[in-house]
């Protein structure tokens, strides 16, 4: 069975069909990319998986769980982590604190034990920090550990968001335009990291990306979308040569 | 800046940065514990008042400063704590049970009220809590059999392990009672902030969507924040009632709610220090103004006259100045001055420059 | 007949609430900030007019004083934005809320210093005159209040929906940055809105002081106007007026038919009910944050 299965999902905002009867599945261990022009509904697919939106029909299964029966906050506890297109970090907290929030789904303590900061809470905090430090090492964030997000440059924020998602120890990582706004060097770094995330950490990656260089460099399979529906699905090379995709990208001029 | 090389995780987890900082706070604690030995009853009373306001401020700080939910109605919870405590005492419950119970009851009521309020954001929440605060005045009058209505109630002296403590008869013991409560509340607050729950509050404040994506249950966490906040405020209310000696429906008006919120803004939102700094301003401003008025009166040659609304007028001006020039409050200013000295002569003016973010609308057409 | 009388006086009161609520909504629509000092603006507008008109102060004729006080209040609103609110550009809504509450305290203090704390009425040409419609006796002031309010709301509504400036103002509120790129002078537009809100508050103040008496604490009435704005749904001008009328009408009826002690609760209870069951007012707009 696939790790993530999306079947016949449709979502409408008023009269606008944002996602139109979309089906695809993501296999364990692959890097799966969604491409498409602006407004194709790519981010909306992420928001459906995150349960920010509820589809009018269809089903979303992750690792044997019916996500449509879950609350938004439970999606993360099953092992789905994500980043956001416009960066949604905890601005007034430090990088370290941001990553520690990522450990929230592994919280064993409760209000009372935390109030007295019992030895078990202390132990849990040490474990969380141990885990988070490994992520910091992995993504080279040591220099920013104690810095507040509000003062960080854009490129670093992008990486911190990936780091925070990794801190949750996910099975599936959703990256919403990981390379948008990054310089050429930063994009290359991001490419290696995505590769490492899959190879070293064994995390399945589903990403939305415009940079076709990055997409064809790291992904195993690509889904092309337009107007909320599926245009093509296959290897990067197959999708790039698909006539429907070329039509959608180059438009009516072609 | 003293750089601490961290060699184990506990250095990060413990509440103090290094031995130097710890010793400063221990000295401060020793001074406030020794205060009754070098202060007269009047100033001890003022100190007590400041500490009670600080506890109330800590209560609101959890909700507004750390969870990002503005409440303009916390006087309602002060009232609940106050009345619950006195009603329990009148019913013969010993103080050592009645007092924490008053806090817990207020916390539970706060959580119940939070459930419908969870759907409200920003200004809507502020307006709803404000309306609630106005209603509490009327509710106290309507529930006269328990609350004494307009006639009010009187606080009896309380028995703590055989010591009879009351504000006028034994100001020193009452001061210690308030001091111990404020220390316990502060320690608990510090513990929460360095644990997952406190971090999830901050996460909610800074970005609800991504908090949710990290597995934080927004509704549940907000409700918990409300409960803790109201519980602490309830404790402060109980102490306020005992301190005032007599109170009625007008003691905890909506103006007190507003004053409490302004207090923590002046002190510095999002810091424990802020609650204490703000309380010092609120506590000592009236004294300061009366001294200033005498002084001005002496210079001008006239007698000092009462100016209604002066206190709030000045308070409002202080607040406006802070919001415009130092949005992080007194704590922010203090932090900058400290950094200036620590870094001397390398402090740069733009070190704490805020990133301007443009207002993004949440409305969709 | 009694009920009709109650209704009319309720409507007249409601108009004043509605006008203050209109000020809230104007500022909210254009800047997404909420001016908690709007009630105090109204009080100040009333006092400025009283200071110009009443014989114990300057004793100017009412029709001369009217444009002056409108101008003064509009200038005050504009300057306030210019000197204070503009510095808050980009800060959170809550910060603006707290700022304007503080501003209200300051205005109340200053008004008390200048005009004292005794309630005062505005001397005006309509004072004491009455009109009767088949047995129904109405104060001319009440009728004037209702007519002026309806005209003003209609005018503002047309302004926002038809004129270029009005639409620019709406655009500026929906996305400051985008509006700025589209060539809307966001800052100047905001200043104009605050000036407009000041003038509207002045009208409300004049009407209120003509019907009754103001003192520096009258501004606290702004809280009821808030209830009105919320009930109408923040962001809708006719909604604000409707909300004001609802609150205004509920009050006299509640105090007549509901047991004493419960009646003054009515507007706030309604406010809470609306917030809980229809959080965005009776004229709701969908709010979903895009990520």
Image (cartoon, coloured by chain):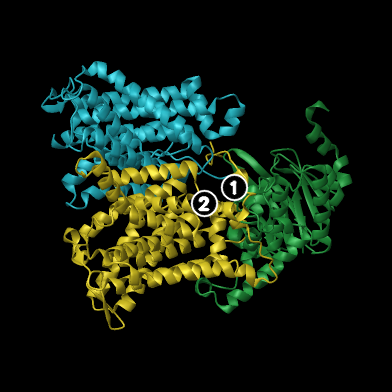
Chain colours: A green, B yellow, C cyan
Residue that extends furthest to the left in the rendered view of this protein? C135
Along the line of sight, the residue nearer the viewer: C4 or B142: B142
Q: Is residue C147 left or right of residue A231?
A: left
Can residue C10 be seen here? The reply is yes
The answer to whether A198 is drawn above or below residue B26 in the figure is above
Judge the density around disc 2: few (<14), some (14-19), many (≥20) Cα neighbours within 10 Å: many
* Quadrant where the image shows the N terminus of chain C: top left
Residue B100 drawn at (x, y percent): 36, 73
The residue that disc 2 covers is: B332
Q: Are the residues under badges 2 and 1 in a single subunit?
A: yes
Q: Residue at x 27, y 44 (%)?
A: B309
Q: Count the marks: how many?
A: 2
Task: Please report contact status of discs 2 and 1: CB closer than 8 Å, yes or no.
Answer: yes
Q: Earlier in the sequence, mark 2 or mark 1?
A: 2
Q: Position of residue B197 (x, y in %)?
A: 54, 65
Q: Chain of mark 2?
A: B
């Amino acid at each position: 069975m696939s790790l993530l299965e999306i079947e016949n999902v449709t979502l409408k905002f008023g009269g606008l069909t944002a996602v139109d009867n979309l089906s695809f599945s993501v296999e364990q261990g692959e890097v799966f990319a969604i491409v498409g022009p602006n407004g194709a509904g790519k981010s909306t697919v992420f928001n459906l998986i995150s349960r920010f939106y509820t589809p009018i029909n269809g089903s979303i299964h992750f690792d044997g769980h019916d996500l449509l029966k879950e609350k938004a906050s439970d999606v993360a506890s099953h092992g789905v982590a994500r980043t956001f297109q416009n960066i949604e970090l905890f601005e007034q907290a430090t990088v370290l604190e941001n990553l520690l929030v990522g450990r929230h789904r592994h919280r064993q303590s409760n209000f009372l034990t935390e109030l007295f900061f019992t030895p078990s809470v202390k132990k849990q905090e040490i474990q969380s920090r141990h885990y988070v430090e490994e992520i910091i090492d992995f993504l080279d964030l040591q220099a920013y550990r104690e810095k507040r997000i509000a003062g960080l440059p854009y490129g670093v924020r992008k990486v911190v968001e990936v780091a925070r998602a990794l801190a949750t120890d996910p099975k599936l990582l959703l990256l919403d335009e990981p390379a948008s706004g990054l310089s050429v060097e930063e994009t290359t770094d991001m490419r290696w990291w995505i590769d490492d995330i899959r190879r070293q950490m064994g995390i399945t990656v589903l990403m939305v990306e415009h940079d076709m260089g990055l997409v064809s460099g790291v992904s195993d399979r690509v889904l092309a979308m337009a107007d909320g529906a599926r245009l093509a699905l296959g290897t990067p090379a197959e999708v790039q040569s698909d006539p429907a995709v070329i039509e959608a990208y180059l438009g009516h001029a072609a | 800046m003293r750089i601490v090389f961290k060699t184990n995780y506990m250095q990060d987890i413990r509440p103090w940065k290094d031995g130097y900082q710890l010793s400063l706070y221990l000295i401060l604690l020793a001074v406030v514990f020794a205060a009754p030995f070098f202060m007269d009853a009047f100033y001890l009373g003022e100190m007590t008042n400041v500490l009670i306001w600080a506890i109330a401020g800590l209560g609101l700080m959890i909700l507004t400063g750390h969870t990002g939910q503005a409440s303009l109605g916390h006087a309602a919870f002060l009232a609940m704590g106050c009345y619950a405590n006195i009603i329990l005492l009148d019913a013969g419950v010993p103080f050592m049970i009645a007092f924490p119970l008053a806090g817990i009851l207020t916390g539970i009521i706060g959580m119940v009220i939070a459930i419908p309020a969870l759907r409200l954001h920003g200004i809507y929440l502020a307006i709803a809590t404000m309306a609630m605060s106005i209603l509490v005045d009327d509710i106290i009058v309507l529930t006269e059999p328990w609350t004494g209505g307009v006639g009010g109630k009187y606080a009896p002296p309380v028995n703590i392990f055989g010591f009879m403590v009351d504000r006028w008869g034994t100001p020193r013991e009452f001061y210690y009672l308030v001091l111990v409560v404020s220390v316990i509340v502060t320690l608990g607050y510090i513990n929460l902030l360095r644990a997952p729950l406190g971090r999830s509050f901050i996460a909610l404040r800074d970005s609800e969507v991504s908090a949710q994506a990290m597995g934080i249950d927004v509704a549940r966490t907000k409700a918990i924040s409300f409960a803790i906040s109201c519980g602490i405020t309830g404790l402060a209310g109980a102490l306020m009632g005992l301190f005032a000696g007599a109170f009625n429906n007008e003691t905890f008006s909506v103006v007190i709610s507003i004053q409490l919120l302004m207090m923590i803004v002046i002190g510095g939102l999002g810091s424990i220090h802020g609650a204490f700094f703000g309380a010092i301003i609120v506590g000592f401003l009236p004294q300061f103004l009366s001294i200033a008025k005498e002084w001005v009166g002496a210079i001008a040659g006239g007698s000092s006259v009462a100016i209604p609304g002066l206190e709030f007028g000045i308070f409002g001006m202080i607040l406006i100045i802070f919001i415009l020039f130092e949005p992080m409050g007194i704590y922010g200013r203090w932090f900058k001055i400290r950094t200036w000295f620590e870094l001397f002569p390398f402090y740069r003016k733009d070190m704490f420059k805020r990133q301007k973010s443009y207002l993004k609308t949440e409305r969709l057409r | 007949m009694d009920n009709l009388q109650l209704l009319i006086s309720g409507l007249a009161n409601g108009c004043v609430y509605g006008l203050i609520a209109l000020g809230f909504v104007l500022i909210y629509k254009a800047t997404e900030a909420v001016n908690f000092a709007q009630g105090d603006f109204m009080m100040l507008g009333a006092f400025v007019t009283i200071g110009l008109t009443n014989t114990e102060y300057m004793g100017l004729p009412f029709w001369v004083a009217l444009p002056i006080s409108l101008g003064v209040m509009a200038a005050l609103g504009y300057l306030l934005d210019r000197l204070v609110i503009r510095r808050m550009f980009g800060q959170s809504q809550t910060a603006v809320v707290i700022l304007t509450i503080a501003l209200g305290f300051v205005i109340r203090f200053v008004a008390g210093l200048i005009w004292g704390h005794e309630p005062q009425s505005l001397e005006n040409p309509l004072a004491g005159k009455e009109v009767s419609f088949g047995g129904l006796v109405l104060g001319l002031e009440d009728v004037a209040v209702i007519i002026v309010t309806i005209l003003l709301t209609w005018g503002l509504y047309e302004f926002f929906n038809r004129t270029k400036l009005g639409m620019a103002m709406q655009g500026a509120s929906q996305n400051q940055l985008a509006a700025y790129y589209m060539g809307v002078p966001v800052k100047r537009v905001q200043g104009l809105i605050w000036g407009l809100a000041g003038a509207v508050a002045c009208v409300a103040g004049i009407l209120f002081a003509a019907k009754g008496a103001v003192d520096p604490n009258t501004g606290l009435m702004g809280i009821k106007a808030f209830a009105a704005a919320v009930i109408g749904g923040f962001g809708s001008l006719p909604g604000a007026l409707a909300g004001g009328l609802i609150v205004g009408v509920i009050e006299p009826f509640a105090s007549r038919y509901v047991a004493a002690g419960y009646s003054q609760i009515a507007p706030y209870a309604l406010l809470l009910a609306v917030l809980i069951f229809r959080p965005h007012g009776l004229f709701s707009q969908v709010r979903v944050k895009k990520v």
